């Protein structure tokens, strides 16, 4: 069994839920979180440019220097069988891809055992 | 790749996040969690508080960066010289695969 952890945009949750249900993964867990990713911009260089007055201070420029800002995201987890991982990853990517940075990340983690609380069975 | 889950005091997240950034680990996810530890929460008078608010940080790093991240979190999330109960915990688990949604590329 594998756990698929996906960090996605907040406005893509409904689309992702629908796509996963259609692909045969109705069970999921979703919760809000805050996060930041890898930014290719060097904040110190931008600060230097702004302070030296070479660039007019604008809202866009200010946004660029805010590398440390956390952005609200949705954290999706589904636990599935090994052979379904590829399909699930493809489904999530297809539903969430806009091509812009900030679309999110997917991580695959191993799951050792699962239990059903209702019956005590060790099946998914 | 390894997933580092750090459960730390909410008032320490600011310093930990900025230190992680300057240590070269900008990518972090943060969420609010509630829990208790080995001390079974806090007892004040007759009341036992066992849902203590904490913040969970999730960082996925390459295996060779594990030590650095753990050190940064450990150094900055600790209270006082020796640390106190309730400073939090760090858990590390294996990550088999990672994908970036915007490019559909595999890997961190």
Image (cartoon, rainbow, N blue to C red):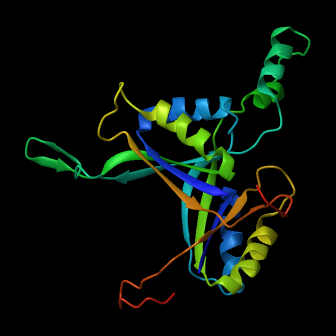
Q: Above or below — where is B70 with respect to B95? A: above
Identified at 68% across, 67% down, the residue is: B96
Q: Check the picture and name the quadrant holding the N terminus of chain A.
A: bottom right
Q: Above or below — where is B56 with respect to A89? A: above
Using the rendered view, name the quadrant where residue A78 is placed: bottom right
Identified at 16% across, 49% down, the residue is: B48
Q: Is residue B17 left or right of residue A82?
A: left
The percent coordinates of residue B106 (x first, y second) are 81, 63
Q: Is residue A99 left or right of residue B107?
A: right
- Number of numbered discs: 0
Q: Above or below — where is B30 with respect to B74? A: below
Residue sticking out furthest to the right: A54
The percent coordinates of residue B65 (x first, y second) are 66, 44
Identified at 76% across, 78% down, the residue is: A86
The percent coordinates of residue A101 (x first, y second) are 81, 49
Residue sticking out furthest to the top: A52
Using the rendered view, name the quadrant where residue A51 is placed: top right
Q: Along the line of sight, which residue is nearer the eye, A123 or B91?
A: B91
Q: Along the line of sight, which residue is nearer the eye, A81 or B92?
A: B92
Q: Along the line of sight, which residue is nearer the eye, A110 or B32?
A: A110
Identified at 54% across, 42% down, the residue is: B70
Using the rendered view, name the quadrant where residue A109 is placed: bottom right
Q: Is residue B100 left or right of residue B57?
A: right
Residue sticking out furthest to the left: B46
Q: Along the line of sight, which residue is nearer the eye, B54 or B89?
A: B89
The percent coordinates of residue A61 (x first, y second) are 82, 25
């Amino acid at each position: 069994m594998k756990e698929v952890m996906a960090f996605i945009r907040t406005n893509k949750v409904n689309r992702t839920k629908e796509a996963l249900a259609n692909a045969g993964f109705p069970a999921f867990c979703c919760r809000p979180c805050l996060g930041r990713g890898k930014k290719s911009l060097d904040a110190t260089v931008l600060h230097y440019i702004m302070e030296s007055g070479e660039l007019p201070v604008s809202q866009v420029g200010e946004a660029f220097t805010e590398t440390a800002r956390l952005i609200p995201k949705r954290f999706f987890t589904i636990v599935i069988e090994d052979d379904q991982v590829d399909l699930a990853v493809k489904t999530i990517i297809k539903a969430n891809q806009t091509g812009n940075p900030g679309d999110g990340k997917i991580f695959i983690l191993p799951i050792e055992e699962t239990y059903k609380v209702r019956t005590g069975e060790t099946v998914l | 790749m390894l997933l580092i889950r750090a459960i730390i005091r909410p008032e320490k997240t600011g310093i930990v996040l900025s230190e992680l950034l300057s240590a070269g680990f900008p990518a972090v996810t943060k969420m609010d969690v509630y829990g208790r530890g080995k001390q079974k929460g806090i007892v004040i008078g007759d009341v036992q508080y066992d849902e203590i608010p904490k913040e969970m940080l999730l960082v996925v790093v390459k295996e060779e960066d594990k030590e650095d991240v753990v050190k940064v979190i450990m150094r900055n999330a600790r209270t006082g010289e020796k640390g106190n109960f309730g400073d939090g915990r760090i858990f590390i688990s294996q990550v088999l695969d990672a994908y970036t949604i915007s490019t559909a590329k595999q890997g961190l």
